Image (cartoon, grey):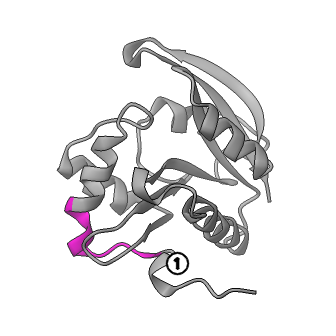
Amino acid sequence: MTEIPERRQPRPILAQDLAGLHALNEAHARETSSMSPEAFVRLLGEAFLARAVGPEGAPEALLIALDAAADYDSPNFLWFRARGPDAAGDFAYVDRVIVSERARGGGLARRLYAELFASAKEAGLKRVVCEVNSDPPNPASDAFHAALGFREVGSARLEDRGKTVRYLERLL
């Protein structure tokens, strides 16, 4: 088995990563959402798990996940918090997972999710949840999440954002 180089492993987010990660977020705002640098830092502060992959100061991938206790007003996050057998605290919500164009296909998102699954399970959470745009469509994300064992549990039209999303969960 080939060992994965350390620079390709998920790691904590460092202060020197913030500008690059915010730029990565903004480059993919259609799939995630745009936010100010200040809002991005606040989101990181609410994270159950926040990880980057890539060189310090120039990361190539990002995952931010929140648990149900987070102070976050995203309609997608709130949808999950309002539903489920123990909606008050049984999930980790993937707010965003982004891999730069140049780093795609290298398994970075899969490594980020593997760390999230392990951390959520260790914390006693029962599921990992997220949403994927269905309008505008995001077939690559659909295929990726299906391969990881996610299943659809709902959908919503977000008129103020001009999108429709599918809500997904993976039981741990």
Does residue 138 appear left or right of residue 45 in this picture? right
Q: State the residue lying farthest toward the top.
A: 159
Quadrant housing the N terminus: bottom right
Does residue 157 appear left or right of residue 16 in this picture? right
Q: Amino acid at mark 1?
A: Gln
Viewer can see residue 100: no
Q: Residue at x 50, y 76 (%)?
A: 8
- Report how many numbered discs are placed on residues in the image: 1
- Quarter of the image for residue 112 reads bottom right
Q: Which residue is mark 1?
A: 9
Identify the element where label 1 is drawn: loop
Quick check: is 93 in the magenta stretch?
Answer: no
Where is 138 relative to 36, above or below? above
Where is 29 relative to 112, above or below? above
Does residue 30 appear left or right of residue 120 in this picture? left
Q: Residue at x 53, y 85 (%)?
A: 5
Of 67 and 62, the residue lying toward us: 62
Quadrant housing the C terminus: bottom right
Q: Residue at x 73, y 69 (%)?
A: 121
Circle 1 residues within 10 Å: few <14, some 14–19, many ≥20: some
Q: Position of residue 120 (x, y in %)?
A: 66, 66
Q: Position of residue 137 (x, y in %)?
A: 57, 23
- Stretch of the chain drawn in magenta: 11-19
Where is 136 relative to 3, above or below? above
